[in-house]
Structure formats: structure tokens, C-alpha cells
Image: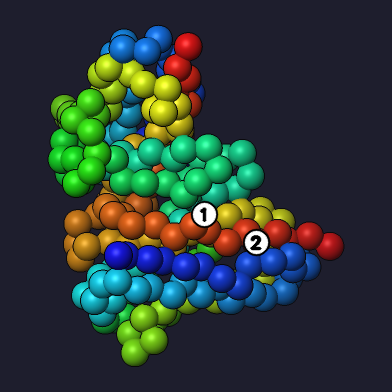
Amino acid sequence: QSVLTQPPSASGTPGQRVTISCSGSSSNIGSYTVNWYQQLPGTAPKLLIYSNDQRPSGVPDRFSGSKSGTSASLAISGLQSEDEADYYCAAWDDSLYGYVFGTGTKVTVL
Amino acid sequence: QVQLVESGGGVVQPGRSLRLSCAASGFIFSTYGMHWVRQAPGKGLEWVAAIWHDGSYKHYADSVKGRFTISRDNSKNTVYLQMNSLRAEDSAVYYCAREPMHTYYFDYWGQGTLVTVSS
């Protein structure tokens, strides 16, 4: 079972801003950087945000990440239809001594 | 361009074994850590195993420890996952992923290979 908790779903109309939360603990988010992955339907995950707030080359600046204490957030501004996907947060966990993913959030564009 | 191509998936009976391969190209394979991540049908992502760039360190999720073995052959640019004593709950799409050393993130993923454990 995942140790990082995300809301199961989020939605918005085109152009709106959507925020996804990721709640962890001192052994994971509280001690390590957070990464976010986007998984479009039927495809492999793709790195979206790394080291809390860094975007890989090619990722639009509509996507932004932040971290505070044992929680992190992903924001999508100017929501577009192609943003419909599952989003996962992830971090290293010292207690489990392994890499942990969030429960995942399905974003729907209304 | 970076490519990771998994192979070796299929249908296998409970208790049997299977070996997955992930062939890498487009980068200096021996300088990256490699991981296996799986996703059961309709479920979320689960990290499975990791191996350092030189193979000197390996680590596993508790759910597979003692049954799965990760290895790599840097001369063949390939990482492997040997899966023994397979269970129904091991059924999933298995992805290999690349980690820039000690960064704790996966910057490239393969397309995945499906493993189904069923009698």
C-alpha cells in the first residue's frame, strides 16, 4: 500500500488551475525531494517534475511543483484537454528503505 | 535518443519463474542506476527493485524480497529482473526506468512488458 496520499480525482474546465496534493511523513517527503510523474492513458509514466519544483526539458511551464514540510503539491495552470492523465507523486522513504509512489490522482478536463 | 525496451513478459503459472530484460540505448548505460517499477491492472505504481550503475548495490521492495533478483550487464546495456516463485499478485505491467545516479527520480521509462500469473 502507498505511503504517500493523494486525492483520487481532480477536475477542471479548460484554462482553469488544478492543484493536486501529496501527503507523506518525515521519513519520505520530510527528508527527501519529491518527484511527479504523468501517465497518459495506455502509456508509460513520464517524469513531470523532479527535485520538488524542477521541470525537465520539454515540460510546459503550466506545470509547477512545491513542497512544504511533509507535503507537496502539483499545480496545473491553464488546464488543457491533453492534461487528462493520472498523476503520481514519489519520493525515497528511509523507513521502508525504498522508493514510494503516491496513490495517484486522475485529472479530468470537463 | 534514450530508449528502454522491455521484453520477456507473458503468462506463467503460479510458482514458476520468468526473466525480464530491459535493453537500453542512446546513453552511457554504465553511468546510470536502473529500476523496475510495476503496475497491476487498474492500479497505481509500485517500485520493485533498484541496482546501482556498477551493480554493486541492489535493493528490493519487501513484497518481492527473496523472490526477485535484479542484475545488469553493462557490456550488453541490459538490466534484468529474475522473478521466481511467482504469485497471482505479481501480475502487472513491469517497467524499467533510468535514474541519474543518486537523484531519486526516474527520467526515462520503457514501454513496459505484461506479466500474467495464472493457472
A11 vs B42, left or right, is: left
* Residue kind at label 1, given as amino acid type: Arg
* Residue A46 drawn at (x, y percent): 36, 46
- Give the total number of marks visible in the rendering: 2
Task: Give amino acid for label 2.
Answer: Val
Residue B115: numbered disc: 2
Contact (Cβ within 8 Å) of mark 2 with mark 1: yes
The answer to whether B29 is drawn above or below residue A52 in the figure is below
In the picture, measured across the screen, residue B64 lies left or right of residue B78, that is right
Q: CA distance from mark 2 to mark 1?
A: 10 Å
Image check: B50 left or right of A40? left
Chain of the residue under label 2 = B
Q: Position of residue B62 (x, y in %)?
A: 48, 59
Quarter the N terminus of chain B occupies: bottom left
Q: Is residue A39 shown above or below B17?
A: above
Q: Residue at x 39, y 43 (%)?
A: A101
Which residue is identified by label 1? Answer: B38
Q: Where, quadrant-wise, is the C terminus of chain B in this rendering?
A: bottom right
Q: Are marks 2 and 1 on the same chain?
A: yes
Tell me the crowding category of disc 2: few under 14, some 14 to 19, or many 20 or more residues within 10 angstroms, Cα based: many
Residue B27 % position (x, y) = 26, 72
Q: Chain of mark 1?
A: B
Please identify the quarter of the rendering in which residue A102 is found.
Answer: top left
At 39% from the left and 57% from the top, the residue drawn is: B109
